Image (cartoon, rainbow, N blue to C red):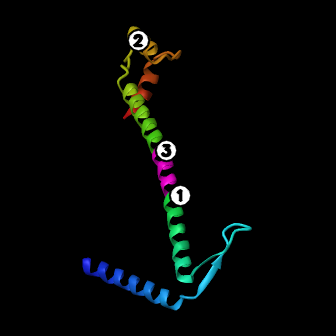
C-alpha cells in the first residue's frame, strides 16, 4: 500500500514540475484598484490560487463540523431525556383493581383520569 502512495506522490510532483516548465511566462496581477500590479510566473499564481481555495474549503468544513457536533450534543441530550422519561414511565406501578393503588398511580403520573382496570391493561399492553 505504501508503494501505491509513493507512486501517486511521484506522479503529482512530476506533473507539477512539467506544469511549471510549460507555464513559465510572467503574468501581472492587480489585487486592488490603484495598486501596482504584481508580476509572477503563471504556474506560481495557479498554485497559489489552488492553495487559497484549499484553505478556504478546510475552514468551511471546520465550521460545518463544529456546527454538526453542537447539533449532535443537543440530540444526545434529548435522547437521554427521552430514555429517562421512558424508564420513569416503565417504573410506574399499575393498579389491578384496588382504589388505593389507582389513586397512587394517578398522583405519581399527575393524571386526572381514573385508573380503571381497562385503562391499566391498555397501558401494560403499550409498554410491552
The residue wearing badge 2 is 104
- Name the quarter where the C terminus is drawn: top left
| Mark 2 or mark 1: whose residue is earlier in sequence | 1
Please tell me in which quadrant of the rendered image residue 8 appears.
Answer: bottom left
Q: Which residue is the site of mark 1? A: 60
Please name the residue that numbered disc 3 is placed on. Answer: 71
Q: Is residue 63 above or below residue 81?
A: below
Q: Secondary structure at mark 3?
A: helix
- Whether pointer 2 and pointer 1 mark residues with C-beta atoms closer than 8 Å, the reply is no
> Where 119 sits versus 112, above or below?
below
| Image point (38%, 20%), residue name | 94
Foreground residue, 5 or 49?
49
Residue closest to the far top: 100
User: Which of pointers 2 and 1 indicates the residue nearer the eye?
Assistant: 1
Residue 18 vs residue 2, the one in the foreground: 18
Q: Gap between marks 2 and 3, in whole Å?
A: 39 Å
Name the element at disc 2: helix
Instruction: State the extent of the magenta-drawn residues as a range.
Output: 60-70
Amino acid at each position: 500500500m505504501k508503494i501505491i502512495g509513493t507512486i501517486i506522490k511521484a506522479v503529482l510532483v512530476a506533473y507539477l514540475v512539467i506544469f511549471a516548465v510549460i507555464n513559465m511566462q510572467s503574468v501581472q496581477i492587480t489585487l486592488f484598484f490603484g495598486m501596482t500590479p504584481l508580476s509572477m510566473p503563471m504556474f506560481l499564481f495557479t498554485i497559489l490560487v489552488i492553495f487559497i481555495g484549499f484553505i478556504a474549503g478546510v475552514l468551511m468544513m471546520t465550521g460545518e463540523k463544529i456546527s454538526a457536533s453542537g447539533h449532535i450534543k443537543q440530540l444526545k441530550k434529548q435522547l437521554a431525556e427521552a430514555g429517562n422519561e421512558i424508564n420513569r414511565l416503565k417504573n410506574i406501578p399499575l393498579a389491578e383493581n384496588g382504589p388505593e393503588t389507582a389513586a397512587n398511580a394517578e398522583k405519581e403520573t399527575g393524571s386526572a383520569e381514573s385508573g380503571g382496570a381497562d385503562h391499566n391493561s391498555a397501558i401494560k399492553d403499550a409498554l410491552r
